[in-house]
Image: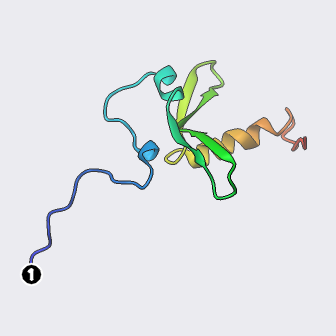
Amino acid sequence: MENPPKDTTNRTTNPGDRISDKPESVEEKADQIAVDAPDITGDHIVVPTYFEVDEPDGEKKALHHVKDAEEISDVIRQARVDENGNRIWR
């Protein structure tokens, strides 16, 4: 029995998880929304597709909420430490 051909489209349950094939600027990416819907509690949730962060050299970078989740976590951790590397609790 032959295997059916693989579907080459990236299907996800959330269309906002898809990454465009065409080049986009950081600004274009920053305007995209992955989720804009009520959650199970009834609260309205808005999740950007990309999080815009500042690089140490001053450049802006767009991090995808799924593909770059680990890097987003690193950025958040860095934002919560002082210049000596000590965690700052807010």
Q: Is residue 21 left or right of residue 2?
A: right
Which residue occupies 14% across, 73% down?
3
Say which element carries label 1. Answer: loop
Residue 68: give x, y in percent of width and height.
53, 44
Can you give x and y, in whole percent of width and height, for residue 82 in the image? Answer: 86, 35
Q: Residue at x 52, y 36 (%)?
A: 33
Q: Is residue 30 above or below residue 89?
A: above
What residue sits 75% from the left and 39% below the top?
78
Please, which residue is most extreme toward the bottom here? Answer: 1
Q: Quadrant of the C terminus?
A: top right
Task: Answer left or right for 20 relative to 46.
Answer: left
Please indicate whether residue 79 sits to the left or right of residue 28 in the image.
right
Q: Is residue 70 above or below residue 51?
A: below
Q: Residue furthest top?
A: 58
Please say which color scheme the image uses: rainbow
The single residue placed furthest to the left in the displayed view is 1
Image quarter of residue 1: bottom left
Label 1 environment density (alpha carbons within 10 Å; few <14, some 14–19, many ≥20): few
**Residue occupying image coordinates x 68% and y 38%:** 75
Does residue 38 appear to the left or right of 76 in the view shown?
A: left
Image location of residue 66, percent across then percent down: 52, 48
Q: Nearer the viewer, residue 58 or 6?
A: 6
Out of 36 and 27, give the one closest to the viewer.
Answer: 36
Q: Which residue, given by chain and number where applicable, does mark 1 sit on?
A: 1
User: Picture quarter containing residue 13?
Assistant: bottom left
Q: Position of residue 59 (x, y in %)?
A: 58, 19
Counting labels gives 1
- The three-letter amino acid code for the residue at tag 1 is Met
